[in-house]
């Protein structure tokens, strides 16, 4: 289980030195949460782990960490993970659609011209022989 770190100061809770190389070594979502000392509910993390990490990666990609102090980098990483996690506490992977395959098959978006689409009812119709 996770520990309660809500009242901890980031400099005391997270080891900030070389945080990005350490995050690159993480092999599971739980590792990221442990490294950054972020609380989580396993019931939320379980079905959304890849989506949360993808969303965190999108946030990370928008930042230029060069010349930032380690303390600031660690704080930003923690904030990005918390923000990504919160997106899936209040929503679902299907609603958030962070992966291309889900974005491409969003029923609320119109089908792009030139995109092959076969309605299921057409599959069920018998093939006529000519």
Image (cartoon, rainbow, N blue to C red):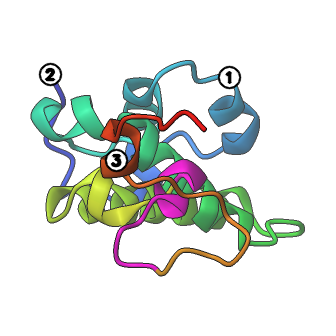
**Helix, strand or loop for disc 3:** helix
Report the span colored magenta.
Answer: 99-109
Q: Nearer the viewer, mark 3 or mark 1?
A: 3
Single out the residue that lies furthest toward the right: 67
**Can you give x and y, in whole percent of width and height, for residue 62 in the image?**
71, 73
Mark 2 Cα-neighbour bin, 10 Å: few <14, some 14–19, many ≥20: few
Find out whether the residues at labels 3 and 1 contact each other: C-beta distance under 8 Å. no
Which residue is drawn at the image coordinates 62% and 62% (left, top)?
58
**Can you give x and y, in whole percent of width and height, for residue 27 in the image?**
56, 18
Q: Is residue 13 above or below residue 30?
A: below
Quadrant including the C terminus: top right
Label at residue 86: none
Q: Earlier in the sequence, mark 2 or mark 3?
A: 2
Q: Earlier in the sequence, mark 1 or mark 2?
A: 2
Which residue is drawn at the image coordinates 11% and 33% (left, top)?
43
Q: Which residue is mark 3?
A: 120
Q: Which residue is mark 2?
A: 1
Mark 3 Cα-neighbour bin, 10 Å: few <14, some 14–19, many ≥20: few
Q: Earlier in the sequence, mark 3 or mark 1?
A: 1
**Can you give x and y, in whole percent of width and height, for residue 65 in the image?**
79, 66
Q: Is residue 17 left or right of residue 117?
A: right
Find out whether the residues at labels 2 and 3 contact each other: C-beta distance under 8 Å. no
Q: Which residue is mark 1?
A: 25
**Helix, strand or loop for disc 2:** loop
């Amino acid at each position: 289980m996770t520990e309660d770190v809500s009242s901890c100061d980031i400099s005391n809770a997270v080891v900030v030195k070389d945080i990005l190389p350490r995050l690159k070594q993480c092999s599971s979502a739980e590792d990221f949460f442990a490294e950054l000392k972020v609380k989580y509910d396993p019931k939320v993390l379980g079905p959304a782990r890849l989506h949360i990490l993808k969303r965190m990666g999108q946030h990370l990609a928008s930042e230029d960490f060069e010349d930032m102090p380690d303390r600031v980098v660690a704080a930003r990483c923690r904030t990005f993970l918390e923000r990504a996690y919160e997106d899936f506490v209040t929503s679902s992977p299907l609603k958030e659609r962070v992966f291309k395959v889900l974005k491409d098959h969003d029923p609320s978006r119109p089908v792009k011209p030139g995109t092959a689409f076969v309605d299921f009812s057409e599959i069920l119709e018998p093939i006529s022989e000519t």
